[in-house]
Image (spheres, grey):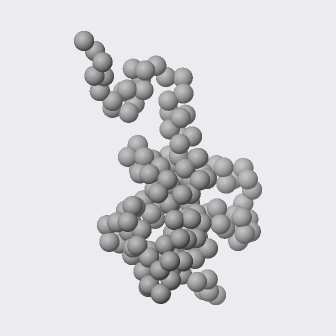
Amino acid sequence: MGSTSKKINLRTSDGEILKVEEAVALQSPTIKNLYENSCPRKVIPVPGVTGNILSKVLDYGKKHVDAATGKENISAEELKAWDDDFVKVDQKTLFDLILAARFLNIESLLDLTCRTVANMIKGKTVEEIRTTFNIKNDLDP
C-alpha cells in the first residue's frame, strides 16, 4: 500500500523540485512559515539551500519524524548511531548542512552539525586547527 500522506513541493536555490511529506517538511519552522504564507502555491521556494543539501536535510528530518511517530521502530541508541553516520561527510557538506540547518531553523540538526565541528577542534593545537580547516595564518611577521 502506498503512502497517503500529503506532499509538499519544494524548489531549491539551484532550481530542483523536491516532493516531500508534509510532516517532514514542516519540521523546519522556515518551511512551515513559507508554506503557511504561500499555501495557494504549488511549489514552496527554499532559496537558501541547494538540492543536494536539502535532500540530506530531508533525509535527516524523515528519519527523526519516523522515529518520533513510531513509523520506524528504532531505539534512541540506534538513532544516535544513525546521526553519527549522517555527519560523516566532507567538510564542505558539513558546513553546508550547518548553514542549511540555520536557515531552516532546525535546531536538532544545527546542534548535531555544530557538535561535530566542535569535536573536530577538541584537543587540537591552533596550528592543527588551521591545518584541519585550511586557514591561513596571517598573524606571522
Q: Is residue 22 above or below residue 119?
A: below
Q: Is residue 22 above or below residue 57?
A: below
Q: Nearer the viewer, residue 124 or 79?
A: 124
Quadrant showing the N terminus: bottom right
Residue 85 seen by the camera: no
Residue at figure coordinates x 61%, y 53% from the top left: 108
Residue 140 seen by the camera: yes
In this picture, residue 60 sits left or right of residue 134: right
In this picture, residue 139 sits left or right of residue 57: left
Q: Name the residue at the front extreme.
A: 37
Q: Position of residue 73 (x, y in %)?
A: 73, 65
Quadrant showing the C terminus: top left
Q: Position of residue 5 (x, y in %)?
A: 61, 83
Q: Nearer the viewer, residue 78 or 116?
A: 116
Q: Name the residue at the left extreme.
A: 141
Residue at figure coordinates x 74%, y 56% from the top left: 75
Q: Is residue 83 above or below residue 52?
A: above
Residue at figure coordinates x 38%, y 46% from the top left: 92
Q: Position of residue 127 (x, y in %)?
A: 39, 20
Q: Position of residue 10 (x, y in %)?
A: 44, 74
